[in-house]
Image: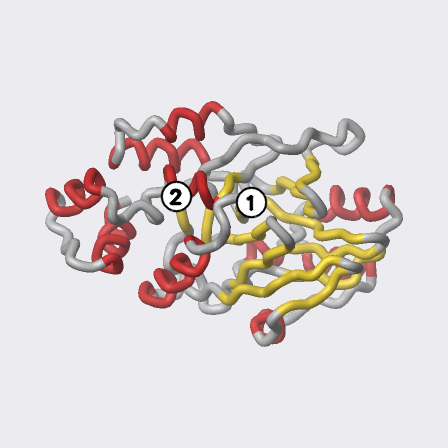
Amino acid sequence: MKGGIGPRTAGPDPSTRGVFVMADIRQFRYGTDNLGYVIHSGRYAAAVDGGATAAISAFLKKNRLDLVEILNTHSHADHTSGNRILARETRAPVADMDEIAARDSFSVGDATVEVIRTPGHSRDSVCYRVEKNLISGDTLLNGTVGNCFSGDFRAFFASLKQLMNLPDDTLVCAGHDYVRASIAFARTLEPSNSALDDFEKAYDPACVYSTIGQELAVNPYFRFSQASIVSRLEAAGYPTGTEYDRWYGLMQME
């Protein structure tokens, strides 16, 4: 498994245990390590990967928010598990993944949500960008990336290159908390990378996120051209002639 985290920039709402504010994004933990989100602006909200149905319903009720749409980052069952319950409780429509992928953006209240198509982890993977927040599902996890279940590694690499080019201060709000395993794997490749120490010290499972800048400093799947990683790949017998070769080699190592 793969993962990571950055420093906290927002504190907890003591009235809602385990649920924390990041700008106009609220994070909800469910299952063993899944993370879902509510985007809200004014009196309107949209759920993304809303498996934490009870906590999301309570949050909507407490804040008098109207849920206008139920969204997913991709169609894997651990991310869609809350759709039916939320739809029944709120009467909000569940967006079809193909329909979502056809959009460039949409609105939630006064907030504009950009849809970034990121096939690779799955054929239908997308990310949602809201101002400086990126809800990245299983495409980009904090400190790592998802598995390539689609089998289309070149598409996955192209998707990650898009995300690497986002502004450094973009907050990465991922679909799972795999932080500790991800840091451990990164240390096997770059044991002298001091940024990993800072990354681990800042980890707080109550509010899990990082920045693109931090990902560039610690995430092996963003650091495929670092000399130390190239040396490890060569020692393991993987081709290193191109960026794709190096990234693909890393995807085979873990």
Callout 1: few (<14), some (14-19), or many (20+) C-alpha neighbours within 10 Å? many
The reply to whether residue 55 is visible in this rendering is: yes
Q: Is residue 253 above or below residue 188?
A: below
Q: At 58% from the left edge and 76% from the top edge, which residue is drawn?
A: 102
Q: At 43% from the left edge and 26% from the top edge, which residue is drawn?
A: 198
186 relative position to 130: left or right: left
The picture quadrant where one finds residue 96 is bottom right
Residue 40 x %, y %: 76, 52
Q: What residue type is labelled 2?
A: Leu
Quadrant occupied by the N terminus = top left
The reply to whether residue 3 is visible in this rendering is: no
17 relative position to 133: left or right: right
Quadrant occupied by the C terminus = top left
Question: What residue sits right under mark 1 in the picture?
Answer: 171
160 relative position to 223: left or right: right
218 relative position to 77: left or right: left
The picture quadrant where one finds residue 44 is bottom right
Q: In this view, does 185 lie above or below 73?
A: above
Question: In the image shown, does 194 or 151 lie closer to the viewer?
Answer: 194
Residue 114 x %, y %: 61, 63
Residue 65 x %, y %: 84, 51
Q: How many marks?
A: 2
Q: Which amino acid does label 1 sit on?
A: Leu
Q: In this view, does 24 lie above or below 88?
A: above
Q: Are marks 2 and 1 in contact (CB under 8 Å)?
A: no
Q: What element carries label 1?
A: strand
The picture quadrant where one finds residue 195 is top left
Q: Is mark 2 on a helix, strand or loop?
A: helix
- Its colouring scheme is secondary structure
Residue 211 x %, y %: 50, 42
